[in-house]
Every structure is written in C-alpha cells, then in structure tokens.
Image: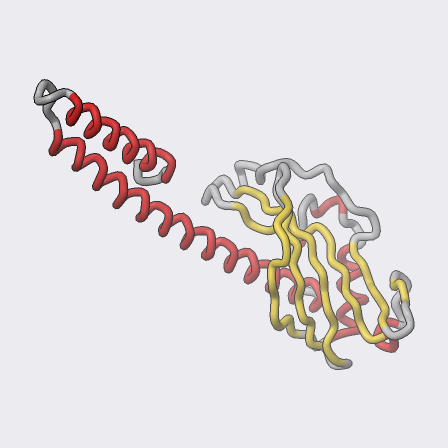
Amino acid sequence: MACCPLAALGGFLTGILSLIRIRRSAGLLGGTRVAWLGVALSLVIGATSLLVAERIQAAQLTGNVSDVRSAVEQTLGGGLDASAWWIPDTHAGLPDFQREMSALLAPIKVGATTQTETLVGNPPMGRFRLVVQTRSGDAIASVEALLITDWNTWLPGPRLQSIEIAMPRGTAETSSDSAQSSDLATVRFPRVDHHEAGATLPRDG
C-alpha cells in the first residue's frame, strides 16, 4: 500500500520472515524470488510514500502560512470576507474592528509570517506570528487559527479564531480595546474567545 509507510514496513518484515522460513525448510519450501521481490518493493514503496508525505506536509504548511497572511492583511485593511473567520456570525464586532484598524494602521502590508506551533485537538489549531508593516512602523501580530478540514480537498485549512497586535504605544492611543504597557499597546480581537467549532466545514462549503 503506497499510501501507508507502516504497510510497507509490514511487507518488508513478512518478506524477511519468509526468507528465513524458506532457508530453514531445507528445500521443502519455495518462493525465494517472490520473497525478495516483496522485500524490494516494500523498501521502494516505503521510501516513496515517506517522501511524498513529507512533501504534502510541507506544501500544506506553506499553504496555511500563505492563507493566514492574506486573511490578516485583508482583515486589517478592512476588506475581508468574514468567512475567513470561524463561525463569522459570532463575531459581530468584526466590521468595527476592521474600520478601527484601517484608520490606525493603513496602509498596511503583512511581511514575514511563520507558523510557530500546532496544537493537537478536534479540530487542531495553529499559532502564527506575523510582521505587520504600517505607516507608523512595524507591528507584531499573533494569530490563532483553527485548521478545519475542507470536504472538497480533505485537507485542513486555516480559519482565523483570534488576532493580537502589539504596536508602538502612540499608534493605538485612539483604540478603546488596547492593553498598554510602557512602550507597546496590544489590540485583541475578538474580545471573547469562542470554542464551539466543529471538526469540519459544512459539506456545502
């Protein structure tokens, strides 16, 4: 089974066991060539499936980072379709947050984005760190996104759950939802986290 490295390992082990039994049978058992073929195919299939799985995982990580960067850039710019957020009807304050961020930060561009952590759960969650370039300088954004399985592709894709932005204090002085330290102001959205998400998107997309 090319899609399963464990199955290839099983094929390799059973091939070796078969060769041992054939050798111990003193000529009573045949099938040496078939056993060697099973061992060789298992090694090839196992190595190939591991390589393919690694590339799929790398492509998925790259896609998640790209999707989160695009969603955050659009959110802060005020032009995001709310479907990029999980259960958008629970985020009634999203338009107000977008207008506030657009007024404070625009024009903005999201630069370097990395996925810092993946938390196992149902559904799993990814944490991302982004550099947000604004007219007042660079801000740092921390984003949590649920990795929701898409029924069309059977691959998990990010749906934003929360965003936190650390900006120079002067930039956010007009923000009513900022927690200020000596030199930074932190703006968060949403104000209350929601954890009612299911494991998959609806089948109708």
Task: Tell me what residue is drawn at x 63 percent, y 53 percent.
Answer: 117
> Residue 124, relative to residue 139: is it above or below?
above
> Residue 101, relative to residue 12: is it above or below?
below
In the rendered image, residue 90, in percent from the top left (x then y), is placed at 76, 44
Can residue 185 be spotted in the picture? Answer: yes
In the rendered image, residue 179, in percent from the top left (x then y), is placed at 89, 63
Considering every residue shown, the one lying at the far top of the view is 28
In the rendered image, residue 124, in percent from the top left (x then y), is placed at 61, 43
In this view, the residue in front, 134 or 35, is: 35
Q: Quadrant of residue 115?
A: bottom right
Q: Is residue 127 left or right of residue 200?
A: right
Q: Quadrant of residue 28?
A: top left
How is the model colour-coded? Answer: secondary structure
Q: In this view, does 92 lie to the left or right of 198?
A: right
Q: In this view, does 142 lie to the left or right of 14?
A: right
Image quadrant in which the C terminus is located: top right
In this view, the residue in front, 93 or 179, is: 179
Task: Tell me what residue is drawn at x 31 percent, y 37 percent.
Answer: 8
Task: Tell me what residue is drawn at x 38 percent, y 36 percent.
Answer: 6
Task: Tell me what residue is drawn at x 51 percent, y 60 percent.
Answer: 62
Q: Quadrant of residue 5?
A: top left
